[in-house]
Image (cartoon, rainbow, N blue to C red):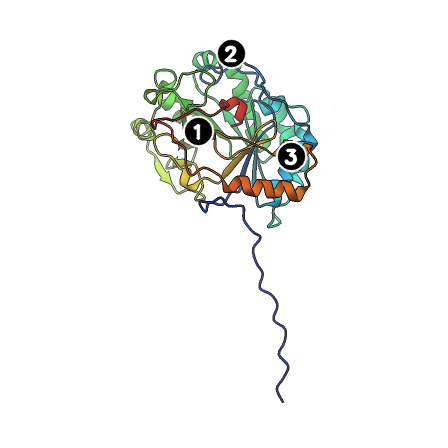
Amino acid sequence: MVAASLPVAPAETAPPRLTDSHGRVIHDLRVSVTDRCNYKCVYCRTGEVGAQYPELNIGEYLRLIRLFVDLGITKVRLTGGEPLLRHGLLDLLRELASLRTLWGEPLDLALTTNGHLLDSLARPLKDAGLQRVTVSMDAVDATIFERITRIPGSFETVLGGIRAARAAGLTPLKINCVLLRGFNDDQVEGFARFARAEDVAVRFIEFMPLEEGRLWSPEIVVPLREIVQRIRKIMPLVELPPPEASETARRYGFPDGRGEIGIIAPVTQAFCGACSRVRLTSDGKIRTCLFSQMEHDLYGRMRAGASDAELRDFIHRTVQGKEARHHIGEPGFLKPSRSMVHIGG
């Protein structure tokens, strides 16, 4: 007599991943909650143009973000403009902190800010569920910093915000500096000392053609190799391994482990082949690349009554069309239809 065979349990399968047509897994969503800003940084804004696009209400942002999380997004970064200007931001963070990824883990929640309002908001942001913060800071010399922001007293205000964020536990704390040759490239060594003194990760970012005016040229870009060489003349650097394949920064540490230097080099050492990112603008458009010439109106479809299933399908199809790479510096290159402040960092 042959014993009856026992039923075989189905093998567990991983949830489907959101991928583009180039095989890249998309797990990082940048969401601009406003294109308003209380700074007028000279490399970013002409000083004449304020908010250009409408903002969604907090419930609408939450619904759209949930759709992306349903499709496998694990990281959400809130940006602007200046996101701390946005009324209802803490409510949005509380709701996002309660979401779980397809793998049952909390969302990785971060925020990029100019730091001007961070001193008073760092603790409420942490209590609402924010995990870490990146502060845009383009000089460690107060005079140069205030010339860039065009806001008197801004340096000490931002420095206070950085220290409040660290005290609140919004770590690892990152400082982003956009370098422009002949403008603030003399700050490199000072930022290396700042990274050590404040025990933060300073990230230098190559200047990209995303400003409102027509300032960008290849000659203004300060490349990765030059930054590393200059810092190594004053202190030793040790290259660090990337935490994941889609890491955008080349990372360098100091022998005692205090502070860190990162260099994001999208112009001279483009990392498009490992891109894991899409963006949602403050008015609900999907941008598959910073330099996209097209936007995809997710919010418009939601307002027209599309179901969640229909919206998820639209996201899938849009991500499938994500560009293979940008074309900065190549003949025929066109700047994107929006500047950085109106896209979301």
Crowd around label 2: few <14 · some 14–19 · many ≥20 (10 Å): few
Q: Residue at x 63, y 45 (%)?
A: 100
Q: Residue at x 47, y 27 (%)?
A: 175
Q: Mark 2 sits on what residue?
A: 47
3 or 1: mark nearer the eye: 3
Q: Residue flagged by tag 2: what amino acid is it?
A: Gly
Please report contact status of discs 2 and 3: CB closer than 8 Å, yes or no: no
Q: Is residue 193 left or right of residue 5?
A: left
Residue 313, horizontal then vertical, whole percent: 60, 43
Q: Earlier in the sequence, mark 2 or mark 1?
A: 2
Please report contact status of discs 2 and 1: CB closer than 8 Å, yes or no: no
Q: CA distance from mark 2 to mark 3?
A: 33 Å
Q: Earlier in the sequence, mark 3 or mark 1?
A: 1
2 or 1: mark nearer the eye: 2
**Label 1: element kind:** strand
**Label 2: element kind:** loop
Please report contact status of discs 3 and 1: CB closer than 8 Å, yes or no: no
Label for residue 202? 1
Q: CA distance from mark 2 to mark 1?
A: 27 Å
Residue 314, horizontal then vertical, whole percent: 59, 40
Residue 151, horizontal then vertical, whole percent: 52, 11
Residue 82, horizontal then vertical, whole percent: 57, 22
Residue 70 versus residue 169 in the image, above or below: below
Q: Residue flagged by tag 3: what amino acid is it?
A: Arg
Q: CA distance from mark 3 to mark 1?
A: 40 Å
Residue 256 versus residue 139 in the image, above or below: below
Q: Mark 3 sits on what residue?
A: 301
Residue 300, picture quadrant = top right
